[in-house]
């Protein structure tokens, strides 16, 4: 009888994990609220249960007698994954780690209590409760919902304006399930993203990527990273310090860090692997299949460290629409690769005929492309070529 794995989420970020599980002969149960998600048609059984409903998912997992539980590319279901794994005696993330990483406020408190570098921060459910403290800081400051991802609700205030600050706080609060907002100082430096696996609270296989931004919107990532070997070592040391202090010994890791001359600041950490095509980027650049490692970890506990491989340059490009409406046309992978031969993969979050919203945060993406990029200076040029070749058409409504 096939072993069974429960995958939390069936969106574009989970599709490669679902596909890999099917390829290795696993029976896949997908769990999510219903919606226009591409993974629904790929799983063996789809269960319309909110992946943040810990008790509901646990009852389902018990009934299905699953052999493992996994996810990737999203923060919101990691606490559920941790609680279910603990209750069923399956490999998973320790509950305190999952709950700390999944809350921006708890993570800030953890850094402060552990004596690790972090920004000044204030948190609360009302702007009036934090306004006087925030006003004393140097600008810019950043407003973040406590528990959302994909850049939703994040805003930067560069010059003091009490009315704009209050509006930014209220907007961030709309994306927070707890109603709490974290306001923190903006850290100047070079931003990098890391993704992979840790063992013994240190990097077992972690790749650092150059995170490409358009304001606060993640445009994509590329390899190799945009920092030298010495700074890469500083980042991995900061990662190990955080994992050791929190007691996170082994498993998936995804993080954003700011590399400044005097310190490396962990901005966000997650006990899962990344979205926006980061695992596919890493596979393109190194040959390492993070999806297989996730499955091995969730079913058997331990994973073998991948063999080092030469790094080749590559990138991802997240695309979407400037307007809301119905997706009427987008090029196929074959058509895209014919016009831009560097493209190796195309993943769609929405299908033709689906409703799409303006790309104001990464949850509204239509999809992403993965491409070879031997020269980092060509990243913008390649993205522009991909954008034209996609022939994206949205009928505004």
Image: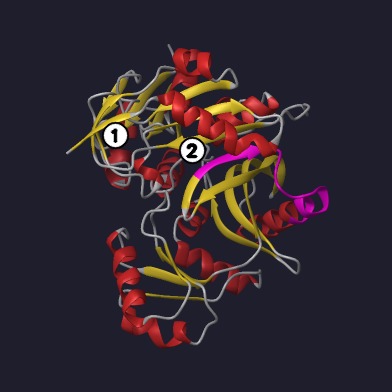
Residue 276: assigned label: 2
Give the answer, above or below, for where 129 lies relative to 65: below
Image quarter where the N terminus lies is top left
Foreground residue among 339 and 99: 339
Please rate how many residues cluster around mark 2, counting C-alpha atoms within 10 Å: few if below 14, some from 14 to 19, many from 20: many
Tell me where the magenta segment starts and ends, as one range. 219-234
Residue, disc 1: 60
Residue 129 lies in quadrant: bottom left
Residue 313, position as x, y percentages in the image? 70, 31
Foreground residue among 244 and 376: 376
Q: Residue furthest left?
A: 397
The residue at 50%/20% (across/down) is 20
Q: Are marks 1 and 2 in contact (CB under 8 Å)?
A: no
Dot 2: element: loop
Of the two numbered discs 1 and 2 in the rendering, the one whose residue sits closer to the viewer: 2
Foreground residue among 392 and 183: 392
| 42 left or right of 372 in image | left
The stretch drawn in magenta includes residue 370: no
Task: For residue 67, say whether it is visible.
Answer: no
């Amino acid at each position: 009888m096939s072993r069974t794995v429960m995958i939390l989420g069936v969106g574009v970020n989970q599709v490669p994990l679902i596909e890999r599980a099917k390829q290795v002969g696993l029976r896949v149960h997908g769990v999510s609220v219903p919606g226009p998600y591409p993974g629904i048609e790929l799983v063996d059984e789809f269960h319309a249960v909110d992946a943040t409903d810990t008790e509901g998912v646990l009852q389902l997992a018990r009934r299905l007698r699953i052999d493992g539980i996994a996810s990737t590319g999203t923060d919101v279901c990691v606490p559920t994954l941790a609680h279910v794994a603990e209750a069923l005696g399956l490999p998973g993330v320790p509950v305190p780690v999952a709950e700390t990483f999944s809350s921006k406020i708890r993570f800030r408190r953890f850094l402060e209590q552990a004596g690790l570098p972090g920004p000044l921060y204030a948190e609360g459910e009302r702007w009036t409760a934090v306004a006087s403290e925030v006003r004393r800081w140097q600008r810019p400051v950043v407003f973040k919902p406590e528990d959302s991802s994909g850049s939703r609700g994040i805003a930067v205030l560069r010059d003091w304006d009490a009315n704009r600050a209050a509006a930014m706080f209220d907007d961030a609060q709309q994306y927070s399930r707890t109603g709490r907002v974290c306001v923190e100082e903006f850290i100047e430096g070079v931003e990098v993203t890391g993704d992979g696996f840790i063992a013994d609270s240190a990097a077992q296989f972690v790749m650092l990527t150059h995170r490409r931004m358009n304001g606060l919107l993640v445009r994509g990532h590329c390899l190799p990273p945009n920092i030298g070997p010495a700074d890469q070592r500083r980042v991995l040391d900061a990662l190990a310090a955080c994992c050791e202090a929190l007691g996170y010994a082994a498993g998936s890791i995804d993080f954003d860090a700011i590399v400044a001359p005097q310190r490396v600041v962990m901005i966000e950490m997650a006990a899962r692997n990344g979205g926006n095509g980061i695992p596919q980027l890493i596979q393109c650049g190194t040959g390492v299949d993070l999806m297989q490692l996730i499955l091995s970890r969730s079913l058997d506990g331990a994973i073998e460290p991948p063999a080092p491989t030469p790094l080749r340059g590559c990138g991802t490009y997240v695309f979407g629409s400037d307007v809301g409406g119905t997706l009427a046309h987008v090029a196929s992978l074959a058509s895209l690769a014919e016009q831009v031969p560097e493209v190796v993969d195309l993943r769609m979050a929405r299908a033709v005929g689906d409703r799409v919203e303006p790309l104001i945060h990464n949850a509204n993406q239509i999809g992403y492309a993965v491409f070879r990029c031997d020269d980092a200076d060509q990243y913008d040029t390649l993205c522009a070529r991909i954008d034209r070749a996609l022939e994206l058409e949205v009928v505004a409504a």
